[in-house]
Image (cartoon, helix red, strand yellow):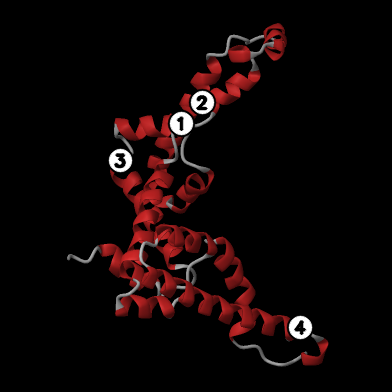
């Protein structure tokens, strides 16, 4: 059986700080946005998607600001989304104070709530849609290869999954051996982190003032990411 690229990607991501699945999805988001701005800015399908989703979600639309060398492409896509928003608003029949008074008292498809509904995205952010598929692929890879020695070793040496991706991995597990291994490894990682948090808390007691800190120094930061994802 051919080993998928996600197998090697996951092992490599285990060497990075934080949840390896989060790291892979962050990488995939950057790659997607770079490809979008470099190759697909002027494609009609891209413009249609930006109009339908009202640009991208808050996270990924904000992430576009990291691609400062491709500002023209960013401007073109934002203009398409903004044009769609303006067209929807322009279709509103109330354009005078008296008209807005009647519109405010209107209901159903004629009230302001209806306009708000029309301004909602008609389809998901294209980056989120791509990452949802990638996330499922990475979680299935854990199910398929956690009993493989190099894969397991890399996972044991990692910071473990964040809680959201641990829940996702649990829902993908189909074999009892891999399931037992996933839970055991994750519990070991979290117990170590909990011990470092306890040490961090203890060392803030006045009786231990001045004692140097070790790995527990940034345990609170790692705990935030471990519980919420990144």
Residue 111 visible to the viewer: yes
Q: Which residue is mark 4?
A: 204
Callout in the foreground (2, 4)? 4
SS type, badge 3:
loop
Q: Quick one: label 4 or label 1, which is nearer the N terminus?
A: 1
Label 3 to label 2: alpha-carbon separation: 21 Å
SS type, badge 4:
loop
Label 2: few (<14), some or many (≥20) within 10 Å? some
Q: Quick one: label 4 or label 3, which is nearer the N terminus?
A: 3
Q: Residue at x 72, y 10 (%)?
A: 101
Numbered mark located on residue 40 in the image: 3
181 or 24: nearer the eye?
A: 181
Dividing the picture into quadrants, the one containing residue 104 is top right
Q: Quick one: label 3 or label 1, which is nearer the N terminus?
A: 3
Numbered mark located on residue 85 in the image: 2
Callout in the foreground (4, 1)? 4
């Amino acid at each position: 059986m051919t080993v998928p690229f996600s197998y090697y990607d996951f092992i490599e991501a285990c060497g990075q700080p934080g949840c390896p699945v989060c790291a892979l999805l962050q990488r995939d988001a950057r790659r997607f946005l770079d490809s979008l701005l470099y190759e697909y800015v002027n494609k009609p399908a891209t413009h249609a998607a930006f109009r339908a989703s009202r640009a991208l979600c808050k996270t990924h639309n904000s992430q576009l600001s990291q691609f400062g060398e491709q500002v023209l492409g960013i401007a073109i896509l934002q203009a398409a989304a903004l044009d769609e928003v303006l067209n929807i608003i322009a279709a509103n029949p109330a354009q005078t104070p008296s008209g807005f008074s009647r519109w405010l008292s209107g209901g159903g498809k004629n009230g302001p709530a209806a306009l708000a509904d029309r301004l909602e995205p008609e389809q998901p952010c294209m980056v989120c849609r791509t990452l949802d598929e990638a996330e499922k692929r990475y979680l299935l890879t854990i199910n398929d290869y956690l009993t493989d020695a190099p894969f397991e070793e890399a996972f044991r040496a990692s910071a473990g999954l964040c809680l959201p991706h641990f829940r996702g991995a649990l829902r993908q597990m189909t074999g009892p051996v891999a399931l037992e291994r996933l839970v055991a490894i994750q519990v070991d990682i979290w117990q170590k982190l909990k011990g470092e948090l306890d040490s961090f808390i203890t060392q803030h007691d006045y009786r231990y003032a001045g004692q140097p800190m070790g790995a527990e120094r940034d345990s609170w930061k790692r705990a935030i990411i471990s519980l919420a994802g990144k």
